[in-house]
Amino acid sequence: MLAYLLRRLIYAIPILIGVNLITFALFFVVNTPDDMARMQLGVKRVTPEAIAKWKAERGYDKPLLINAQAEGAGVLTDTILFTKSARMFVGDFGRAEDGRDIAREITSRMGPSLAIALPTFILGLFVTISFALLLAFFRATPLDFWGVVLCVAMMSVSGLFYIIGGQYLISKLWRLVPISGFSGGLDAWKFLLLPVLIGVISGIGTSARWYRTIFLEEIGKDYVRTARAKGLSELTVLFRHVLRNAMIPILTGVVVVIPLLFMGSLLTESFFGIPGLGSYTIDAINAQDFAVVRAMVFIGSVLYIVGLILTDISYTFVDPRIRFE
Amino acid sequence: MSFLPVILWSDVLIWLLVVAAIGLGVLSSRSPPLRAAWQRVGRSRPGMAAATVLIAFVLVGLLDSIHFRPRLESRENGDVGQQPLAYAIEVLSLLDAVAAPLRTRNEKTYSEPLATRAYAKESIDVRDADGVMRQSRDFPRLKHGGAHLGDNEVQRNADVGRRVLVAVALGGVLWGSMALGCAYWLARREACLVRKVWRGLWRGHTDFAWNAVLAALGVLMLLTMVLLALCVDYHVFGTDKVGQDVFYQVLKSVRTALVIGLVTTLVMLPLSILLGILAGYFRGWVDDLIQYLYTTLSSIPGVLLIAAAVLMMQVVIDTHPQWFATAAERADLRLLALCFILGVTSWTGLCRLLRGESLKLRELEYIQAAQAFGVSDLRIILRHILPNLMHIVIIALVMDFSSLVLAEAVLSYVGIGVDPTMISFGTMINNARMELAREPMVWWSLAAAFVFMFTLVLAANMLADAVRDAFDPRLAGAA
């Protein structure tokens, strides 16, 4: 098990280097730092001095790959590739346009992101699996048919409308909870209620339909027939046998996203004014703050790879046949 | 010539797709398994109803994909020869020309659907009983909405009702004749009584789901007639902040959604098919390299990769204004770049599927036999592997369409979608969102975008289900 994990971690290194090179190519080769400076300072009437100053302030005034003027190791380290891209491996993300340290900003914004994402994830998983089990229990009845129709209809609604509609109905019309905002401590619940509810509802359509297909596939298998022949009730069959075996394909899709919960949801956070990482990213995109977007891309892929490894580990818990030797 | 044809890049690609679709149709009709699968799709009633609705959307989109620049009227009519021909800087499409009344009759600002007066009060001059001009605050009369009523604004409801009735009657007659024509045609083809065909058609005895197509056509026809009858003299869905007709915006959004949903697959398909087959068929270092490539790409969360790429594209476009002759060309190129970026970031899923399937196929006896006969690799891939992957490709195509249309709205909201000047569902929602806080609420823009987008995506999802059921060998065997 440990050897397997170690091997997986070593496999992750070339992938992270690849991600790093892609972001490097996107942010520094497709557009030179000069282009970015011109963009940030306004396209018209930009003096070369202003561009040079902008670059020097942000450390973009170095050669891209090889610094021929430097001495010793500086030939490779005193370059943009090293200072801006390779430094991300040790958690040094540089500074945002407003001068704040990105790494510190990210750690302080993780909390609010998790406060939204974690309840949404757990509650959502519970609700969708229950709904899918219900449909599977009443398979080939009108309830099942209309349930699937409902799922397809819910899939076809853009996530934006769920948020806008929910905010309008619950906050504006019924005035149950505030429209947006956030506060620390225990008071946060009334700000969290609506985003979590909307997050759960908007996820039902796609996932419940998919889980239903998985359940139905399991129900058709031989061991289920055996279980019924033993005289087990349909409910016992569903919960004791079908649900357990269906967990393997469900986990494949679900565990991968757990680490990504740290990143928060772009839409939810920006609509509800929650100071998490999702709204941080959106603000950075709107302000064209390249350093922040670059950092988020890197962190996102690190978390995704962690998710892949977690998926493999979770298999050993639900399926005793799988062993990593 | 009174106009200058303009060929935008996205137009070229859209018409190319039409040609490709016809090509696929011809190809499918020659291959028995594909033909059988399409016939299974044709038997699915929800699928065919959805396809009818989708075709209506595609027709609007195609009409909007023929562009031209109208000639400017020269001031002196006599000596046209001496003046150089001047064309308007504005690029119009055939749809713009057809819907000219919708496009040109702008109000000052918001107005409700079918309203005759504006949404906000203004100071207006009113002549009172003594004939003296006096200022008062009231809702000003709209310039175009219900202008034909003149001073008899109270008759608006009666007028709307009359128009709806006439439209419904006309639509009903048109639809009835079309349904009868269809029955006659079927009866002649099968050489039996019209009445028998008519009854069988509605009871679903036909091989093709004619009843679903006709029913969907009927609903579409009635709605179109009603909208047509009303949009001539009213703003059916109201007007937006700058007074533009919302119905016109919705029609224009259809093309943007179609381009995003269809052109993206044009970028995605070659990448995923080529790399997937190469990896699965050749294995070894080719497989390792391609697997590394798609694992790396797919490990970056999609939105962030798209955001990074779009930000960079914006810098390129903003620093090279000299590339674009008109604003429409710039918006168009930006749309295509977005499609390209979406395609490059989303080919990995399909590639993985195709690789797995090719791995399985290459171990089958008939391919090993071909290899033993010394058939070249290229020929084996083209003759044996590719045709056996077609069902996966077709399923992926229709499944991706709806998610891409939904993604466009989200991306435009985040600020990394289409050009802000380009009308799309995303920009419509984005503009309307701010106005929900107003009192009374401005809901019509959002509602119109919702209804049309929902219909489009729902139809696409339903067709995708039908296609998947028909093409997936595991499901097709069970049905």
Image: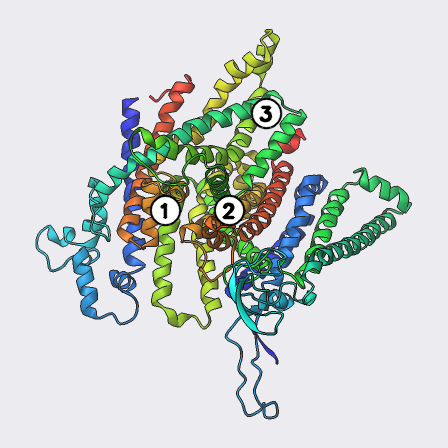
A87, above or below B337, in the image: above
Q: Earlier in the sequence, mark 1 or mark 2?
A: 1
| Numbered disc 1: secondary structure | helix
Which residue was labeled with disc 3?
A135
Q: Which mark is residue B304?
A: 1
Q: Classify the position of the C terminus of chain A by image quarter.
A: top left
A23, above or below B464, in the image: below
Quadrant housing residue B250: bottom right
A303 horizontally vs B371: left or right: left
Under mark 1, the amino acid is Leu
Q: What is the tally of numbered marks visible in this picture?
A: 3
Is there any visible trace of residue B32 in the rendered image? no
Classify 10 Å Cα crowding around label 2: few (below 14), some (14-19), many (20 and above): many
Marks 1 and 3: which is nearer the front? 3
Q: Residue at x 59, y 64 (%)?
A: B142
Is there any visible trace of residue B116 in the rendered image? yes
- Chain ID, mark 1: B
Q: Residue at x 10, y 57 (%)?
A: A70
Which residue was labeled with disc 2?
B406
- Chain ID, mark 2: B
The image shows residue A260 at horizontal and vertical percentages of 35, 36
As measured in the structure, the alpha-carbon distance from the residue carrying label 1 to the one carrying label 2 is 17 Å
